[in-house]
Image: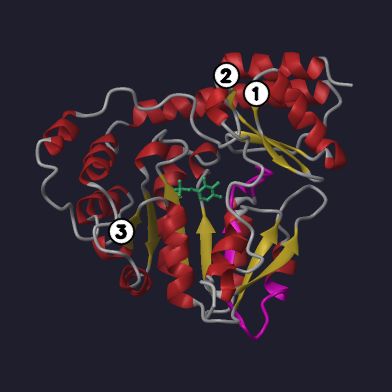
Amino acid sequence: MALRPSGRLHGLPRYGKGRASQAGAYIHRLGSNEAPDGSSRLPPAVEDVLNHVNRYPDLRGETLAAALATRYALQSDQVAVGAGSIVLLEQLIRAFCDQGDEIVAPWRSYEAYPILAGISGARLVHVPLDSNYRMDPERIVASIGPRGRMVILCNPNNPTGTVLSEDVIDGLLDAMPRDVLVVLDEAYVEYSLSPTALLTSPGRRLARHPNLAVLRTFSKAWGLAGLRAGYCMASADIVEALNAVAPPFPLSSVTLAATTALLDCSERLLARIKQNETERNRLTAGLRQAQIPVSDSRANFVWLPVGQSATLLAGHFAQASIAVRCFDGEGIRITTGAAADTDAVLSSVAAWR
Ligand SMILES: *Cc1c(COP(=O)(O)O)cnc(C)c1O
């Protein structure tokens, strides 16, 4: 008998489909929602750590978790860290879902959700977005069946960039059954909330909702995708369950030192958020002027629901050395980059059709 992987992998979509192959070969890399610039000067703490790489790092990333707890005015047992928020989501699913359980998520949303659900033998229940590409709160609540264990809300939503207001999210949380874990995936939240709301919203919500887990990441607005770090804010019980399925030493000592030190330098973050807004507005206006549909985005990317033209349009961009994310038959997602990236996209669409 030949060697076979588990049946759970059968028919499972693969991550990265639609990603431009050899993205590095493109001049304008607008396919993965990365920040156009990184935090160029890494703090001296990183250099120190590089002199001690023979030692294991924190067992659970405690130093970073404690710094994050302070930043968000939470208890230190309310924060877990992992090598990307996607890893933490996988841990949450493993910790809370059994074979055959259901995970409710608006759709279209992040392409990793069905993969992560499938790996655990859980089933993703799709709730279609409304005609403005927004999540529909009533339909989400109505879609939680007897096997429903988890709801994943991506806000701002990837790939549409759309948001539900803070009030609507609060109402939705109030309406959720208490025995269902609600995961708020806030990978892009820095682009959509005021600096004050960014710091206070997790604590305010966690005080009311013991069944809530908020996921954030250093990969997007913080410009640190290559370091791999994300965090989960939740009740101590949820964090405990999440840590129970975590591998030991989830973050490298270099990542721990860099992220912990960079938490204190938010000017770069604020500048990046501001630049993103300028470029996203330019991109949206220019694309609409070229008669291309664009949803209202509050993230660092825009969504072009062009349907059957998606593959052709992505090919057209590729000829101008612009890598975008293509969802065949549905649309295209373009990351907001630097001014030169916006210029390239807009001059490319001028020659479309
Ligand atoms: C990019 C992204 C993530 C974050 O991934 P990391 O593993 O933290 O790099 C999580 N959720 C969504 C919706 C994303 O687009």
Residue pictured at 68% horizontal, 60% vertical = 106
Label 1 to label 2: alpha-carbon separation: 6 Å
Q: Residue at x 56, y 24 (%)?
A: 25
Is residue 33 rendered magenta in the image? no
> As shown in the figure, which amino acid type bears the numbered disc 2?
Ile
Question: Looking at the image, is mark 1 or mark 2 earlier in the sequence?
Answer: 2
- Bounds of the magenta span? 141-163
Report, in whole angstroms, how far the alpha carbon at label 2 lies from the one at label 3: 42 Å
Find the residue positioned furthest to the front. 1
Residue 74 placed where, x, y %? 30, 58
Secondary element under disc 1, as helix, strand or loop, is strand
Instruction: Specify which label sits upstream in the sequence, 1 or 3.
Output: 3
Q: Residue at x 74, y 13 (%)?
A: 347
Residue 145 drawn in magenta: yes
Neighbour tally class for label 1: few under 14, some 14-19, many 20 plus, Cα within 10 Å: many
Residue bearing mark 1: 322
Q: Estimate the x, y position of residue 248 in percent, counting from the top left.
A: 25, 63
Marks 2 and 1: in contact by CB < 8 Å? yes
According to the picture, the residue beneath numbered tag 3 turns out to be 74
Residue 156 at x, y percent in the picture? 60, 47
Judged left or right of residue 227, residue 214 is: right
The label number, if any, that marks residue 27 in the structure image: 2
